[in-house]
Image (spheres, helix red, strand yellow):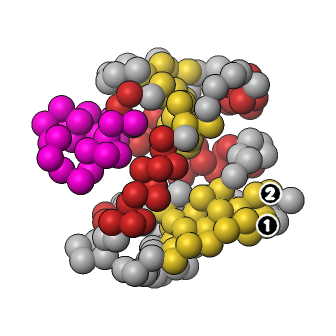
């Protein structure tokens, strides 16, 4: 999950344009994120962020094979994507399933199925719900070199985590891996 130095995952209105600031992109940090995606075969998403997210990565996959972003588009487009929604909102895109069952029950069932890791890409409310239900086994926090001053957090309550690894990149991003204790 991308977060700011002051702990926000998005601006007050859900803005994430600060994640990819011009001149602050590090190819090694991007490759780390691509490698992480390739360890997974399922992606969980909240309904609010799905449309733009899916459209973006399918566009890169279909039309920008020469782009550095193609390396990320390929696993995202090809993996199973489960979109959690409280309604019957249609969701379009490749390998997408709409899920409106009980979040805790569905995620626990998914975690018990064979396969690779499960990746979560948000949005903020969705991730907060997973955290509240203790459904996240590993936290990869991508700390971006920017302070927002205000915004949307993903942690609504105190949560103790143990640092497993930390990798700093030349353009200021730091990726920390934590596990719950």
Residue 73 lies in the magenta-colored region = yes
53 or 90, nearer to the observer = 53
Please determine whether, in this image, residue 32 is positioned above or below residue 25.
above
Q: Which residue is mark 2?
A: 180
Q: Residue at the spot x=65%, y=20% of the render?
A: 101
Please tell me which residue is depicted at 47% across the width and 50% down the height of the picture. Answer: 35
Q: Is residue 1 above or below residue 74?
A: below
Image vertical order of residue 137 relative to residue 80, above or below: below
Residue under pointer 1:
162
- At 15% across and 42% down in the image, what residue appears? 64
Q: Is residue 155 left or right of residue 31?
A: right
Considering only vertical position in the picture, is 5 above or below 81?
A: below
Viewer can see residue 125:
yes
Residue 87 visible, this angle: no
What stretch of residues is rendered in magenta?
50-76
Crowding at mark 2 (Cα within 10 Å: few <14, some 14-19, many 20+): some
């Amino acid at each position: 999950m991308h977060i700011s130095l002051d702990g926000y995952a998005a601006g007050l209105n859900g803005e994430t344009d600060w994640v990819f600031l011009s001149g602050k992109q590090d190819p090694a940090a991007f490759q780390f994120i691509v490698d992480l995606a390739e360890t997974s075969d399922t992606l969980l998403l909240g309904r609010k962020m799905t449309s733009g997210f899916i459209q973006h990565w399918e566009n890169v996959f279909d039309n920008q094979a020469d782009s550095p972003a193609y390396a990320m588009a390929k696993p995202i487009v090809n993996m199973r994507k489960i979109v959690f929604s409280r309604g019957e909102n249609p969701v379009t895109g490749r390998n997408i399933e709409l899920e409106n069952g009980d979040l805790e029950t569905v995620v626990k069932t998914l975690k018990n199925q064979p396969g690779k890791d499960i990746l979560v890409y948000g949005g903020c409310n969705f991730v907060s719900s997973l955290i509240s239900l203790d459904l996240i086994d590993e936290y990869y926090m991508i700390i971006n070199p920017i302070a927002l001053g205000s915004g949307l957090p993903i942690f609504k309550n105190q949560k103790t985590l143990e640092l497993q690894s930390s990798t700093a990149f030349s353009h200021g991003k730091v990726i920390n891996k934590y596990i719950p204790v």
